[in-house]
Amino acid sequence: MKSKVLILSPIGDVGGRELEVGFIASILSEKYNVNVISTGNYTQNSQVKTFKGFSVTSLKYLIFDNNLLVRFLIKFISLFLKNISFDASSLSSPLLKKVLKVQKRKSIILNNEILKTDIVFICAQLSSNYIEEIILIAKKNKKTIIFRTTGNISKNLEPTYLKYVDLFIHHSLKNAKKLNKNYNFKVIDQCAFNEENFLKIPDLNTKVNNFMTVSRIEKNKNIDIVINAFIKSADINDKLYVVGNGPDLEKTIIETKDKRIIFTGFIHNNELQEIYKICQCFIISYYKLEAGPLTGIEAMAAGKIIISSKTGAMTERIIGEHVFWHNNTIDVLSEKINKVKMLNVNEVTEISKINRDRYISEYSKEKIRQKYLDAVSLLNYKDE
C-alpha cells in the first residue's frame, strides 16, 4: 500500500504558492496517495487545480461540507444578514467564527487528518497560521514532517518547535542559512510549470526595446520603482508591460500617464508566454519577503535578458558577467535599463542563450521533479 502524504498550506486562488503546491502534489502523487488541505481562503477556482493526481480541499470546506448543523445555521443566518452567504467562505465571518467555534473545529480536523497520514508536508512561511499546531500534532503522533518554506526567512524567527521538522526544503542556500545550521535541509528551487511553452520561444535576436514585469500590484512589491525607472530611461518606441493584479492596480494606472506603459491585469500562467514572446527584457522588482520569485525562473526558461534586484533566490539563479543587478532605486534601475538597451544583437542573443541554458541545466521540471521524489524517498518509506 502506498504511503499517504498530507500537504498543508495556506493556498488561496492565485499565486506562486498555489502553483508550487499543485506541482509538488502532482509529483508526489506518482508514488504516494496525496491529499492537499488549505488552511487559507481556497476556492474551487484555485490555480492549484491546474495540476492533477491528488485531492484538494480546505479546512473551511471540510467544516461546511461535513456538518449538517453548520450548514443549517449558516443558511438560517444568511436569511437575515446580507453579508453572509450560504457557502464555506462565510466561515470567515467574525460572527460565525464565534457562534460555530470555527477555530476549535479546525483544530479537530487538523488532528484527525494528520492521524490518517504518514507524511505531513507543510508548504508555508514560518510565520503562517497553524504551523506550531501542525508540527506538534505530527510530532506527538510520530509522523514525518517536511517543511517547504515560502517567503524570506527572518533571522529572528526560530521557535523551538521547528526542531521537530525532519526535513526543511528551501528555495536557496541563502534562506537556509538563516535557520539553525543543525537542521536537516535540502535546497530545491522552482521550475517553470508552463515550461514547454516557454522553451518554444525563440532565442532573442533583436536589440532590446520591450520590457516586462510580472507581479502582484501592491506597495511592498515596489512596482512603482520599476515604472518610474522605465519612464526615466525609455525612448519613444520602448514599452513596459506590467502584468498582474492587486489592491494598488487602479491607483497605479491612474498615476501613470505614460502611454508606453501597458497594464495587462492578471494573465493565467498558461497564457503568459504570449507576453514573453514580444518582450526582450524581464525586470524583477525588490520584495523584502521574497523567496523565489517564480517569475524569475520563467524569464530564464523564456530566454529573456533579466534585470533583477538581489531578492530571494535570484543571486543563486543567474550568475556570471552578464547579470544586471539593481538596488531598488530609480536611478540605478534606470541605468541598468539603459545598459541593456545598448547591447548589440549578438550580445543579446548570447545572454538569452546563457539564461535559458542555465534554466535547462539546473531548474527544468524534470530536475525539480526528481529532487522532490528523492528527498521524500530518503526518509526511508517503503512503497509498493
Image (cartoon, rainbow, N blue to C red):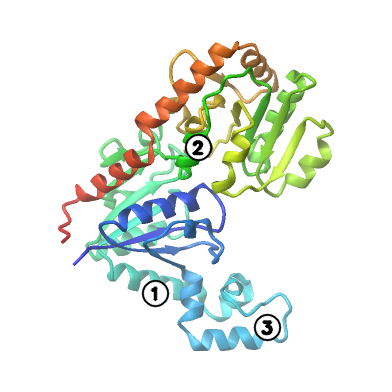
Instruction: Identify the mark nearer the N-term, 1 or 2.
Output: 1
Quadrant containing the N terminus in the rendered view? bottom left
Say few, some or many: other residues with alpha carbon within 10 Å of mark 1 (under 14 / 14 to 19 / 20 or more): few
Circle 1 residue: 108
Q: Nearer the viewer, residue 359 or 283?
A: 359
The residue depicted at 60 percent of the width and 26 percent of the height is 281
Q: Which residue is mark 3?
A: 78
For mark 1, give the secondary structure.
Answer: helix
Looking at marks 1 and 3 on the same chain, the residue that comes earlier in the sequence is marked by: 3
Q: 219 or 257, which lies in front? A: 257
Residue 198 - label: 2
- The x, y position of residue 253, in whole percent, is 79, 41
Residue 286 pos. (x, y %): 59, 31
The amino acid on which the numbered mark 2 sits, given as a three-letter code, is: Phe
Residue 200, placed above or below residue 84:
above
Q: Is residue 297 left or right of residue 362?
A: right
Q: Quadrant of residue 276?
A: top right
Where is 214 relative to 33, above or below?
Answer: above
Location of the C terminus by quadrant is bottom left
**36 on left or right of 351:** left
Q: Which x, y percent locates residue 79?
A: 70, 86
- Residue at image coords 74%, 36%: 262
For the point 81% across and 35% down, the residue is 256
- Label 2 or label 3, whichever lies nearer to me, is 2
Quarter of the view holding residue 374: top left
**Upstream in sequence: badge 2 or badge 3:** 3
Distance from disc 2 to disc 3, alpha carbons, whole Å, reads 46 Å
Q: Position of residue 316 (x, y in %)?
A: 41, 27
Q: Is residue 247 left or right of residue 151?
A: right
